[in-house]
Amino acid sequence: KYMKEKGGVAFFNELADKKAGMLYDAIEGSDGFYACPVEKHCRSRMNVPFTIGGGDEALEKKFQEEAKKVKLFTLAGHRSVGGIRASLYNGMPMEGVETLVAHMKSFQEENAK
């Protein structure tokens, strides 16, 4: 019922494209500070993995700790590959992705070498 009220599958499909596009654009526009290890044609709209500073584990840990201050949680990457993983399932509102992107930009400004 909720999905139909929102506009059905078409609405959520478009929303998923917008959320993933916003996050991938932030990664691609970071001059290499953030990097996605997945080739563009294979990327997921639901789980977006990325590394920070070329895979700097200390920087990635700092990013996750500071993310908690803006209510962003469970950003740890998969245990087999590390890094950061943002899950953009239907339960994640656009505002959550906007908060993540804003955090990414301010974190980059503060920590880019």
Image: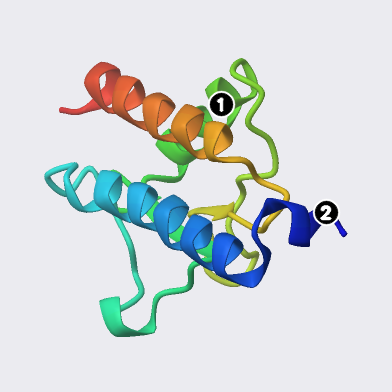
Label 2, label 1: how far apart the Cα atoms are: 30 Å
Residues 24 and 109: in front is: 24
The image shows residue 5 at horizontal and vertical percentages of: 76, 53
Query: Image point 76% across, 59% down: which residue?
Result: 3
Name the quadrant of the C terminus. Answer: top left
Residue occupied by mark 1? 67
Mark before the other along the chain sequence, 2 or 1: 2
Q: Amino acid at mark 2?
A: Tyr
Tag in front: 2 or 1: 2
* Furthest residue in direction bottom, as rendered: 41
The image shows residue 104 at horizontal and vertical percentages of: 37, 32
Dot 1, how many residues are within 10 Å of its Cα: few (below 14), some (14-19), or many (20+)? Answer: some
Residue occupied by mark 2? 2
Residues 89 and 87: in front is: 89
Q: Is residue 19 left or right of residue 109?
A: right
Query: Image point 23% across, 20% down: which residue?
Result: 109
Q: Quadrant of residue 59?
A: top left
Tag 2–tag 1 contact (CB < 8 Å): no
